[in-house]
Image: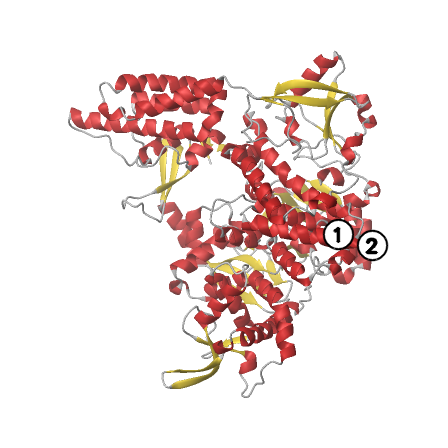
Amino acid sequence: LLDIWNKAHTHTHTLTSPISLCRPAERSGEDVDIILTRLKGVKAFQRFHPSLLLQICSCAFYEYLEKVFRQGDIGTSWYAVLSGSLDVKVSETANHQDAVAICTLGIGTAFGESILDNTPRHATIVSRETSELLRIEQREFKSLWEKYRQCMAGLLAPPYGAMESGSNNDQKLQRGGKVMRNAILSRAPHMIRDRKYHLKTYRQCCVGTELVDWLVQQSTCVHTRSHAVGMWQALLEEGVLNHVDQELGFQDKYLFYRFLDDEEEDTPLPSEEEKRESEEELPETILFLAQIGPDALLRMILRKPPGQRTGDDLEIIYDELLHIKALSHLSNTVKRELASVLIFESHATAGTVLFNQGEEGTSWYIIQKGSVNVVIYGKGVVCTLHEGDDFGKLALVTDSARAASIVLREDNCHFLRVDKEDFNRILRDVEANTVRLKEHEQAVLVLEKSPRASTLGNIKYTVMSGTPEKILDHFLETMRMDTHHADPDDFVLMHCVFMPNSQFCQLLMLCYIFNPVCTYHAVAPPGSEQERLEYAVTSKRRVLNLALRWAAVHAHHLQEEQAALTFLEELYGSVSSDSRILRALKDFVPDLEKVVKLHIDMKSQKVLLREFSNGDERLAKKQPIRNCDEILLKVYCSDHTYTTIRVAVAATGREVTSAVADKLASNDDLLLVHLSSAGEKQMLKPNDVSVFSTLSINGRMFACPRDQLNALTPLPDQEGPSAGSMSSFELMSSKDLAYQMTLYDWELFSCVHEHELLYHTFGRQSFRRTTANLDLFLRRFNQVQLWVVTEVCLCGQLSKRVQLLKKFIKIAAHCREFKNLNSFFAIIMGMSNPAVSRLTQTWEKLPSKFKKFYAEFESMMDPSRNHRAYRLTVTKIEPPIIPFMPLLLKADDSKHHPGSETLQESAVQ
């Protein structure tokens, strides 16, 4: 996507300077389609008219900026946030150093509309993290505003302006209630009848538990009973379904509920025509309720007084808080505390003032639904906040007056509110439950007491920060000895981020030899020689247990590091010697011997890869690709000749370039370029690791002098196939195809080591490690997705295209049945590609049954509430599963960015 926004520029960019912008006139129709797909994923743009979105895709620029503009500047552009977040700072004086951050802008936020009347900027906008911005220059923006004023009023508004709120959802809920009632009367008419309870008769009622039972049986998109409760709650909130005693919450109990149509006496039963229509609409209605049900359930729980919330209620709130970006910097302990005190607050009318500038701060707010304007006296609207943003915390922290007024921008806004008293109490509790170990006036270990005691009743602590040495000491002191060696844990998996294996091995060996002194809560045993000996043996056993767990997790990675093998050999020798005196260590000798022998044998094995698999060759069993493996790599020249070089899998761009220059006997300063099938060029950096695995599906690697860069053209075989495989493809069983795809995907997924996810998130250049197995698995996702698009687009006959869509929907259904979510979503995303979705005549011919299946599948890709639909789907599936890997990596990337440093003042954060 970045290549398309900045097409015709071959140099790379840094994340700390503006990107050199392209000329929009150079964008092709395919480029615009790709940009359009990205913008449709941003909630703020989803309500835009397609023609407006196309105009934006044609004229907008893409930027990374640290400081967007200063207060008082004359604006030249309008901006929208695609990813990341930015602070809005306002100064009452001319000095920018006095500026106070009044709010934070999140994804989907727009700002900079002062360019409409050429007034100075009312605030300074500064990036809080790596942020992607969409920028439209003043002339184009004014033109769009004049042409699409009504459409764009939803994304920006004049001071105190408000969005018009439609009643589409209200109408769908009203209709949904009728459909559900008619379906029940058609399928289970005994559920709606007169009921007697405590000598009183309740007319035409349903029982809550029966409604939940019935709904769970109707569709696979109803994940749990609590999910069904939320769906009925959505109808109850709208008044389509009512409790006979007018209670506001739906419960999965023997309680009576009545549909609105049954409130009147002698309500006629639905006709056969109405029943038939309801049967047709039922899947779509259930799908709609399944999407809004979780929000309704959360609202119902938050409306309860904090003291009446059950443990299950608190878990549901806590799970939602985990996915709110405004709270991502808080510890899980604080989030659990917030779950017990959050209050739901809603306001129906746009223009409502939530609080005024200068008032005392009494609450902190998080926007759950809707948007608000931030208004400052004399300056008007300085920014707009959307779902997931928070405001009002500054006045509580500093105990000062409100720095701005907050005005509702649209109808029906929902907020999560934390009152000042609870806010201050949580801060006090966090401080009271924090333990700090200091050495030379510096904190070397910071622990937070966990609210949940361990199974032994002892106090448990969570490490918040510390030096690598003290974190290791703490882990050894608190480590459970009954855990199996193969069971991973956070420390063993994550230590490579802040403590390389060489340092870890050295420290662990010292811990074994010298038995470290306890850091805080454990006291070295006084008294007899026997007690001191027992303490020393216990400490050694902990070190050995950790060493075996570490060796099991790192598996084949260890033979690539001589320091690790040396450590294992030395440790094995020390334990063998000590076990003659200390019998308690004898149990570890055979395990250590196996580990040492295994890794010495594996060290001599080296695999030669012919090529980074494009899927043409199907091996009997995929084996993990290691750093020490080698690959035969084709590197092309500008005249389409190529040379084959043999390099290590983890070779850098510099090493590949050097090998090519040696092979060609060239003295030129060569550039290493990734050339896509569309002719787009990306220069690879000298320190890029494992460059061969970053090539796109039809991409090729070229090496050329700088003066030949513009002459590079794609190879003929990069254009892809010219004919589809419909003739052979349609003869294959959909279930067999899905099964074979799952077998192959499972092999690829099994080769991915947990550390590759860390290397991808934190940058493999920092570790000098390959992520080739992960890259191959991600490449598989792209292959399947593009396979769907290619087959459909290469099929010239309308009737056969319809058959293809049916075939792919069946394959997707079977992939989900086989728990292969990676291929399942690849197929669905391929079908939602603009090149396929624009084939309106083909989709019109698709039978309604398949349209319903596709609509249900597509709803699982709903990105709202941090992809809640996907999370609910996964919770319902028993492992093992093949996950939707691109989404997992997206979640990891959103939590880590260059601004969140791992080490600060020698302490791990």
Q: Is residue 362 above or below residue 499?
A: below
Q: 369 left or right of 685?
A: left
Label 1: few (<14), some (14–19) or many (≥20) C-alpha neighbours in 10 Å: many
Q: Secondary structure at mark 1?
A: helix
**Residue 407 visible in the current orientation:** yes
Please state which amino acid type lies under the numbered disc 1: Arg
The residue at which mark 1 appears reads as: 801
Q: Is residue 212 above or below residue 622?
A: below
**Residue situated in front as seen by the camera: 655 or 390:** 655
**Residue situated in front as seen by the camera: 728 or 832:** 728
Residue placed at 56% from the left, 21% from the top? 607
Q: 700 left or right of 418?
A: right
Residue placed at 38% from the left, 39% from the top? 447
The residue at which mark 2 appears reads as: 143
Mark 2 vs 1, N-terminal side: 2
Q: Quadrant of the N terminus?
A: top right
Q: Is residue 344 above or below residue 19?
A: below
Q: Residue 779 location, x and y as percent?
A: 64, 36
